[in-house]
Amino acid sequence: MQYLALVRQLVLVGAVVSGLPYTDHFLNRGIGNFQPFEKNDVPGGLANWAKDKYLLAPGHEATKKRLLDLLTANPQDMTHSDYARPTQPALHRLKEIRIPTLILVGDADIPDVHAHAGAIEAGIAGSKRVVITDAGH
């Protein structure tokens, strides 16, 4: 939020905000999907994410195959080590955003992302949240 004067509009897609916790369901889903990677089973880990029910809306089998193809072609995107930097909670700072903001979330996305989208909408005056039908994360 250091460079707000340089931004005229904001579109957030599937966004989350630091300072708002995640549910056990959200965290356990991630842990489960990443378990094969811990055993060096990259194809298994990629398959878990490609079939994750929150990433794509149900009934999009060709898109799931395409997602798996993309992940398989670029496994480094899922297998690199993340060294999380300490993050300051931003939830209370949302009120500092004073530009037109559109918040998009897929109707099939995980409930945590919907909760975060609601918190972001409540925190940014004049923002608008739109739920995209037949879409995941």
Image (tube, rainbow, N blue to C red):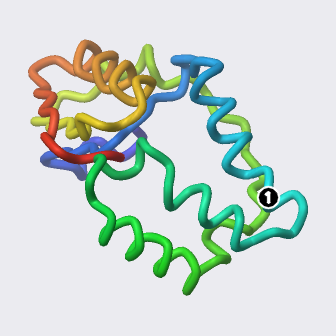
- Where's residue 92, x and y in %? 43, 14
Does residue 20 lie above or below 132 as drawn?
Answer: above
> Please, is residue 50 above or below residue 101 in the view?
below
Q: Could you say which is closer to the camera, residue 91 or residue 69? A: 69
Q: Secondary structure at mark 1?
A: helix
Residue ID at (69%, 73%): 43
Position of residue 47 measured from the top left corner of the image (x, y, whole percent): 60, 64
Hey, what amino acid is under mark 1?
A: Pro
- Relative to residue 112, is residue 21 drawn left or right? right
Front-lying residue, 41 or 113: 41
Q: Which residue is tagged 1?
A: 36
Give how far across and how far down residue 127 sits, in percent.
13, 26
Q: Nearer the viewer, residue 119 or 130?
A: 130
Binning the other alpha carbons within 10 Å of mark 1 as few (below 14), some (14 to 19) or many (20 upward) gives some
Instruction: Decide: is 90 above or below 99.
Output: above
Q: Is residue 133 left or right of residue 47?
A: left
Task: Return the residue nearer the eye: 100 or 70.
Answer: 70
Residue drawn at x 24%, y 52% as measured from the top left: 6
Q: Quadrant of residue 117?
A: top left
Q: Residue 120: which quarter of the image? A: top left
Q: Is residue 63 left or right of residue 91?
A: left
Residue displayed at 48% across by 25% down: 90
